[in-house]
Image (cartoon, rainbow, N blue to C red):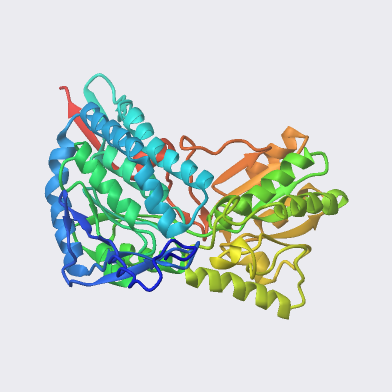
Amino acid sequence: MTDITGTATGATSAPAAPPRRHEHWINGAAVPPAGGAYFPTRSPATREPGDEIAAGTAADVELAVAAASAAWPAWAARPAAERADVLHAVADAMAAGAAELTELERATTGKTDGQLKLEIDMSVAYFRYYAGVLRALHGRTIDLGAGAHAYTRLEPYGVIGAITPWNLPLNQASRALAPALAVGNAVVAKPSEFTSTSTVRLARLATEAGLPDGLLNVVTGTGPEVGGPLAAHPLVRKVAFTGSVLTGRHLAGVAGDRLIPVTLELGGKSPVVVFADADLDRAAAAAAGAIQANSGQVCSATTRLLVEDSVHDEVVARVVERLERLRPGVDFGPIITEAQFDKVLAAFAQAARDGLTPLTGGAAYDDGPGAAGQYVRPTVYADVPPTHPLAREEVFGPVLVTRRFSDEADALAMANDSDYGLVASVWSGDVARGLRLAEGIQAGQVAVNGGPLTIETPFGGYKSSGYGREKGLEALHDYAQTKTISLSLG
């Protein structure tokens, strides 16, 4: 007989299959961890255990850096057109392997189908974009008169250490790897220990597509065991890091002691400013979408909603109405790590102790489809005091706080009243005013009336949001150094 699950009654169930293991990718091959250790992952959507990841150490970093150091000179010497052809082939391989990359990301992040498709497609697009613009990258000539010829050229640093976060695993890795490789560097990547698998698979796909061995190495593990030794390694000539302000400050200190450059993309507490003459429905949709996308786990999420007083309540009501229609697991995903899930809930508890009551949300799901995983209800707190932690600190979850402003000067002051300066959004029927505010806001990217911010538009922060630029042509310059050559014709 069988029960309703189809299992034979009285029969001994088969033992569970052992978890799949993911090794490092070093010098074009899968390499077991030097210490022999692995650590588990789990799905944030179900809390069920997942694959095991190689637990890297300084010995693994040493092996990867040695491979990268040996590989980059020949790669840098190849014509830009040849490097571009290889990057196009990598993009083709990623597109062909999109289904597997999607499932690897789904297993460790629990993201929705729509979010996964967006991120995988953009990851492929990074390689296509930098393969394309690489062929037009060049230095410049400098007129020193008829007796001389001077020109500049962009040259790679050599070995780049790329430390990427758990919130957008493949997307953030591709954003750093594509331009770094394009200009002739080799890379040792250290993805988050929570979401490593898709980056390892990307490295394998790249090798199979024709990227020479040693140019893209992936060492998985924790920050102290892998990230620290990578940043401190004497053959690593530049570090790119996306993550917390605390870790970014530490890495900046390490880089400063070594006198090497570092690109830091850190936190944000970005404003969306809505004037009374704006298209209020579009503005409300954008404000709701900012915390729906990836459940607010995006450094550039606009989580401070600043609204002109006369329309504040109307706009906030429209935002709340949109958020309350969202379904966990369908319209938004879970909080990806258990520690971050606990941090978001702790922020709710602190807000309650301080007398703040959310208009919607403010809790995890305790019943229904969201209860099985680390899902948090999309949350709005209105009229939050500007000194409260909810208004100043990055929650990194689906949490929006609102304030009211009286006029343009008031709006600008509120927008800039933050330790961060990553992005901002302005909505106004008066385009000139929108542009004035955009120019006055202290942030690396500002969208006016929903202006697109794409791969082509450079991205990076002011203030505690970091420095250096990713995306756009600026990223190619960030991963290269300028050499000047001058010839006397006399």
Q: Residue at x 25, y 36 (%)?
A: 484
Question: Residue 413 sits in which quadrant?
Answer: bottom right
Horizontal relation, residue 105 to residue 365: left or right: left
Q: Residue at x 62, y 52 (%)?
A: 292
Horizontal relation, residue 200 to residue 384: left or right: left
Please name whichever residue, 100 or 154, is drawn nearer the observer in this view of the structure: 100
107, above or below 277, in the image: below
Q: Residue at x 57, y 55 (%)?
A: 329
Q: Farthest residue toward the front?
A: 1
Question: Residue 141 sits in which quadrant?
Answer: top left
Q: Farthest residue toward the bottom?
A: 353
Please name whichever residue, 17 or 466, is drawn nearer the observer in this view of the structure: 17
Q: Farthest residue toward the right?
A: 310
Q: Position of residue 230 (x, y in %)?
A: 25, 63
The N terminus: image quadrant = bottom left
Q: Position of residue 207 (x, y in %)?
A: 20, 42
Please name whichever residue, 12 or 448, is drawn nearer the observer in this view of the structure: 12
Q: Is residue 278 visible?
A: yes
457, above or below 222, in the image: above
Q: Position of residue 488 (x, y in %)?
A: 17, 27
